[in-house]
Image (cartoon, grey):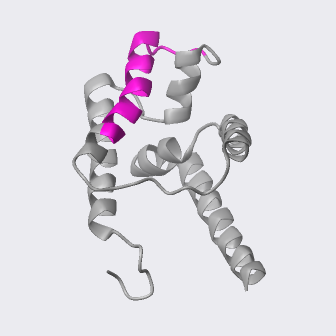
C-alpha cells in the first residue's frame, strides 16, 4: 500500500503497462501496424477504411476483453463501478467522437505515437494529460 493511496495497486499497474507495451510492440513488429484501439475499432466496424484486414481488426477487438477476462481469472479482483450504464454509454460515445476528432486515442497517440517521437502524438498526449490534470484539480475543488 502506498501512503496516501490506499487503493493503489502498483504491481498490477506495472504488469498492465508492460503487457500494453508488449502488445503494441508485437503488433508493430509483427503486423507493421500501430495499435491504436479507436482506429482498429473504426476499421473493424467499417466506420473507417484502412489496409488492415477486417478479420485482423476483429481479432484484436475480441482479444481485448478476452485478455482482460483471462487476467482477471488469475486474480481476486472486482471491477470498480463508477456510473450507471446510460452514463457510461454516453461517455463512451463522447470518447469515440473525440478520438475521431483527434485522429486517435490515448493508446495510439500515447503508447505508440510518443514512442515513435511523432510530433502530433506528443501534442495530443500533452493535451490529454493537461485536460486530465485540470479535470482532477477542478473536481477536487468541487468535492471539498
Q: Is 69 situated above or below 16?
A: above
Quarter occupied by the C terminus: bottom right
- Verify whether residue 59 appears in magenta: yes
Q: Nearer the viewer, residue 41 or 116?
A: 41
The residue located at (34%, 46%) in the rendering is 20
Which residue, as the protein is rendered here, is positioned at the far right? Answer: 142
Q: Is 86 situated above or below 47?
A: below
Looking at the image, residue 96 sits to the left or right of residue 125; the answer is right
Q: Position of residue 111 (x, y in %)?
A: 43, 49
Q: Position of residue 23 (x, y in %)?
A: 30, 39
The residue located at (26%, 44%) in the rendering is 73
Q: Is 61 situated above or below 49?
A: below
- Which residues, given as a range, are shown in magenta? 49-69
Q: Nearer the viewer, residue 98 or 12?
A: 12
Quadrant in the rendering for residue 129? bottom right
The residue located at (67%, 48%) in the rendering is 84
User: Dominant secondary structure of the magenta stretch?
Assistant: helix
Is residue 24 in view? yes
Q: How many numbered marks, from 0 up?
A: 0
Q: Position of residue 2 (x, y in %)?
A: 35, 83
Quarter occupied by the N terminus: bottom left
The residue located at (62%, 57%) in the rendering is 128
Which residue, as the protein is rendered here, is positioned at the far left? Answer: 74
Is residue 22 in view? no
Q: Nearer the viewer, residue 120 or 132?
A: 132
- Verify whether residue 66 appears in magenta: yes
Quadrant in the rendering for residue 35? top left
Amino acid at each position: 500500500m502506498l501512503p496516501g493511496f490506499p487503493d493503489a495497486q502498483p504491481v498490477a499497474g506495472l504488469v498492465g503497462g508492460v503487457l500494453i507495451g508488449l502488445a503494441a510492440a508485437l503488433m508493430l513488429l509483427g503486423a507493421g501496424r500501430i495499435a491504436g484501439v479507436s482506429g482498429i475499432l473504426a476499421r473493424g466496424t467499417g466506420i473507417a477504411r484502412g489496409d488492415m484486414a477486417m478479420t485482423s481488426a476483429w481479432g484484436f477487438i475480441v482479444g481485448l476483453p478476452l485478455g482482460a477476462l483471462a487476467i482477471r481469472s488469475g486474480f481476486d479482483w472486482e471491477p470498480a463501478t463508477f456510473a450507471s450504464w446510460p452514463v457510461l454509454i454516453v461517455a463512451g460515445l463522447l470518447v469515440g467522437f473525440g478520438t475521431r476528432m483527434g485522429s486517435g486515442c490515448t493508446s495510439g497517440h500515447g503508447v505508440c505515437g510518443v514512442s515513435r517521437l511523432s510530433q502530433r502524438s506528443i501534442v495530443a498526449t500533452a493535451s490529454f494529460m493537461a485536460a486530465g490534470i485540470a479535470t482532477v484539480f477542478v473536481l477536487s475543488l468541487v468535492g471539498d
